[in-house]
Amino acid sequence: IPDCYWAHFTISFPLMFIFSVQPSSQLIGSIIGRQGTKINEIRQVSGAQIKIGSQIDSSSDRRVTITGTPIAINLAQYLITSW
C-alpha cells in the first residue's frame, strides 16, 4: 500500500497473520469504495478479513488491519494497490 506511515506483522495461532498499516487519509476512501463495494469484493476474492479502524487521535489517520493466511494477506494487499 503506497504512502504508508508504518506497517506491523503479528502472528497468531493457528497460522493466522495480522498485517496493520496506516495509509494516508486520502487512500481510505479508495480502499472502501462506494458503499463498501471495493472492500467487500477484496474480502471475498482474497479470503482475508479487512478492518478499517476509527480515526486515530485528532488526526484523520485510520488503521487498516488485514488478517488471514500469508497468501490471503498478500492477495488483499495486491488487490488494494491495483484496483
Image (spheres, grey):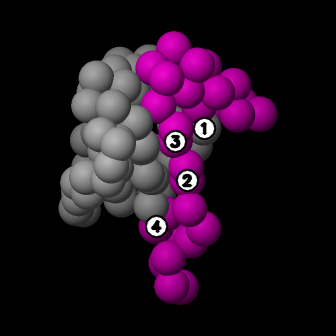
Percent x, y for residue 63?
Answer: 45, 61
- Label 4 secondary element: loop
- Give the alpha-carbon distance from disc 3 to disc 1, as whole Å: 10 Å
Question: Viewed as shown, does residue 69 lie left or right of 65?
Answer: left
Dots 3, 2 in contact, CB < 8 A: yes
Circle 2 residue: 52
User: Tag 3's secondary structure?
Assistant: strand
Disc 1, SS: helix
Residue 50 shows which numbered tag?
3
Where is the N terminus found, in terms of image quarters? top left
Disc nearer the start of the sequence (4/2): 2
The percent coordinates of residue 73 (x first, y second) are: 33, 32
Q: Amino acid at mark 3?
A: Ile
Q: Residue 61 bears which disc, if any?
A: 4
Taking the spot 28% from the left edge, 23% from the top edge, the residue there is 71
Under mark 4, the amino acid is: Asp
Upstream in the sequence, badge 1 or badge 4?
1
Q: For the magenta stretch, what is the residue range?
A: 33-62
Q: According to the image, label 1 marks what residue?
A: 32
Label 2–label 1 contact, CB within 8 A: yes
> Would residue 20 be visible to someone looking at this image?
yes
Q: Position of residue 2 (x, y in %)?
A: 26, 41
Decide: is 24 above or below 46: below
Which of the image's four quarters has the C terminus? top left
* Residues at marks 2 and 1, CA–CA distance in whole angstroms: 9 Å
